[in-house]
Image: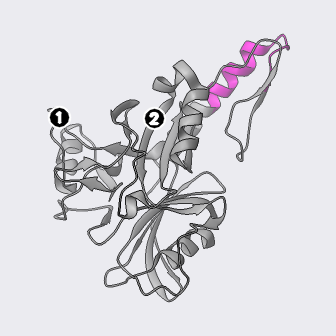
Amino acid sequence: MIPAEPGSTREVAPRGRATFRIDTTEKNDDLANMKLLVLGFLASLCTVHAAVVEESMIHAGVKFRVVKLAPEQVTLVWKDAGGVPYRSFEKVQAAFAKQGKTVRFIMNAGIFEPGGIPSGLHIENRKTLHPLNLADAPGNFFLKPNGVLWIEGGARRAAFVSTPQNFQKREKLLGSMASSWLELAVQSGPLLLIEGKRHPAFIENSKNKLLRNGVGVAADGRLIFAITAKGEEVNFWDFAGLFLKLGCKNALFLDGTISQMVVNPTEPASVNQFGSMFVVAE
């Protein structure tokens, strides 16, 4: 947890979530902190091994596949141990199998460049492997405001979706702790929802409909992953509306036509080529 200042009361969970308050003036300070650490550890054991369940939803006449996950369950991958991008779900499955783990969920993450290189920020296992991209250019990624999904914390993690500028502010606030506190991050664009409102560029009843996938953060702190079902297409306005319906205030578009999601696969998944990927493995 983020350490509290001596003689003060400090929130140790992010704004907008249930918080623990630790009064550092109490004599049993160390005992209280230890109890929180133990509770957080036990809670993480429960969530990390929770089942991955896919739901089917219909919104605006479009069918979607939806998976809700605790931040503790989710990892982000891009390259293998030799520094070569995985590119495919199948190769990620094989890599985790060598570790004695089974992939329960996998979805392509942010937009990428040729060779599977992320178009923007990529933090994996607390290491920044690709920098934040604040450039202006054509395309969905650069439709401002674009955004960053990041997960931070220790045993008990929290997920956030916001603008690159707000991510930078958070990084500055964490200071020297950032490199050990930020678990993962991925940049993409555009943001679908910004504090409960659709991106200002979205047009209601737009005819620009495609297969799309995205991720949001629900009020209970869970990550909401959604993708249009096979044969379905959706515009940005209605896709953002899906995340509103699912209780998200902030959500991020991940990618379009090539996007795919596999849940509880029983065999190697032969899919498209990607950059970074979200994974749940146990």
Q: Secondary structure at mark 2?
A: strand
- Where residue 33 appears, x then y in whole percent? 70, 20
- Where residue 231 appears, x then y in whole percent? 31, 85
Q: Are marks 1 and 2 in contact (CB under 8 Å)?
A: no
Is 263 magenta? The answer is no
Q: Which mark is residue 83?
A: 1
Left or right relative to 3: residue 165: left
Q: Is residue 282 visible?
A: no
Q: Secondary structure at mark 1?
A: loop
- Where residue 93 appears, x then y in whole percent? 22, 50
Looking at the rendered structure, the kind of residue marked 1 is Gly
Left or right relative to 70: residue 245: right
Figure quadrant of residue 106: bottom left
Applied colour scheme:
one colour
Q: Which mark is residue 183?
A: 2
Q: Which residues lie in the magenta part? A: 22-39
The quarter in which the C terminus is drawn is top left
Few, some or many C-alpha atoms within 10 Å of disc 1 (few <14, some 14-19, many ≥20)?
few
